[in-house]
Image (cartoon, rainbow, N blue to C red):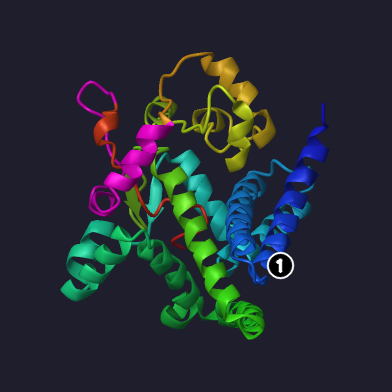
Amino acid sequence: MLQPKLKNILAIAYVLSLYLLGIVAILQQSWLLNTLGVVAISHSLVISTGLTHEFIHGNIFKSRQLNVFGGKLMTCLNGACYALWENLIEHHFHHHLHHTDVVRFDLVEHLNQEISPWQRQVYIVLEWLYFPVLEFELRWRIILDPLMTPTKRNLLGRTLGWAVLRTFAFGVLAWVSAKALLLYFLAYICFVNTNRFVDAFQHTYDYSILGADFPQFDRTYEQKNTFSNLLSVKYPWLNLLFLNFGYHNAHHHHMSCPWHELPALHHKLYGQSTHNLLPLGLSIFNYHRFRLARLFSGQGELNANGELQLASFTGGVAASLLTPPY
């Protein structure tokens, strides 16, 4: 049995090595290696997000400084580095403590009224094609905040520094191989879609607009509106592909439980019960079926009996821990 420290070190090493191997693979002439490279980069970014989440909760190291360093390292890979680490923490802990997802604007109003009809149509077409344009808009808003918001001008130098560094890195990649740059972009789109799929069906929380009062919900509401989306019940090791992030009810029961102990906690709390456990096949089908509807429908809701109607569960958007609205 591996010690917890070794499990964490192996997870970090897995992300860094897989990411580098993916870069090497997309630089090759072979389309088979290119395909494997796209998968490798995408999956390394998915696990880096899971580790970012663990670092936010301080579940990796005993030292706060090491958790901050590790978390910032992961954000360098997955692109959340433009957001302040403190904002990532604040955003995610609001999710836990207030049982809501904070967004910077009303999503439905934004898509229906704030943007022009032709822009909305572009959004609809791109989202239909599985290009997560709304998620990219949220990322670009974070990048442009220091230019657009006077109170954030003090972050301009930091943001420009990251922009220059990342532009240089992608410029070098394009100089070596334009095809590799396109493949990296494809890998990033796959990563955002994968994270979006995982996030979409884990809650039926209400959205809270930035600056508004937080709703008053208790722990009963939290568990009732939280769902676990495992890749496999029969083969628990498959859930490591998402760093056990699918054990979401267990995580919300005890948010300081590290990723490698979540399966045991889930079994202790729920045993063989399938309550609040979403079937994988239906989740995949709903992600495909409602990819446009979820842009305009919140995160779904329970019926009058307090039950979830799985067949009509649209899921939500804009719930990523990587895009704080602050």
Above or below, 323 relative to 261: below
* Residue on which the image places disc 1: 24
* Image position of 282 (left or right of 139): left
Q: Amino acid at mark 1?
A: Val
> How far across and down, in percent of the image, does residue 110 sit?
25, 64
Q: Is residue 291 magenta?
A: yes
- The residue furthest bottom is 175
> How far across and down, in percent of the image, does residue 111 sit?
23, 64
> How far across and down, in percent of the image, does residue 12 sit?
74, 50
> How far across and down, in percent of the image, does residue 38 sit?
58, 60
Above or below, 298 relative to 174: above
Query: Which residue lies at the image location 49% right of the left edge and 40% below the top edge?
Result: 96
Q: Is residue 163 magenta?
A: no
Nearest the viewer among 74 and 44 is: 44
Q: Quadrant of residue 8?
A: top right
Query: Which residue lies at the image location 68% right of the left edge and 65% below the top edge?
Result: 25
Structural crowding at the residue carrying mark 1, measured as other residues with C-alpha within 10 Å and reported as few (<14), some (14–19) or many (≥20): some
Secondary structure found at label 1: helix
Query: Which residue lies at the image location 48% right of the left edge and 40% below the top edge?
Result: 97
Magenta stretch, residue numbers: 280-307
Nearest the viewer among 275 and 38 is: 38
For the question of whether residue 116 can be seen, the reply is no
Nearest the viewer among 47 and 69 is: 47
* Image position of 135 (left or right of 18): left
Number of numbered callouts drawn: 1
- The N terminus lies in which quarter of the figure? top right
For the question of whether residue 303 can be seen, the reply is yes
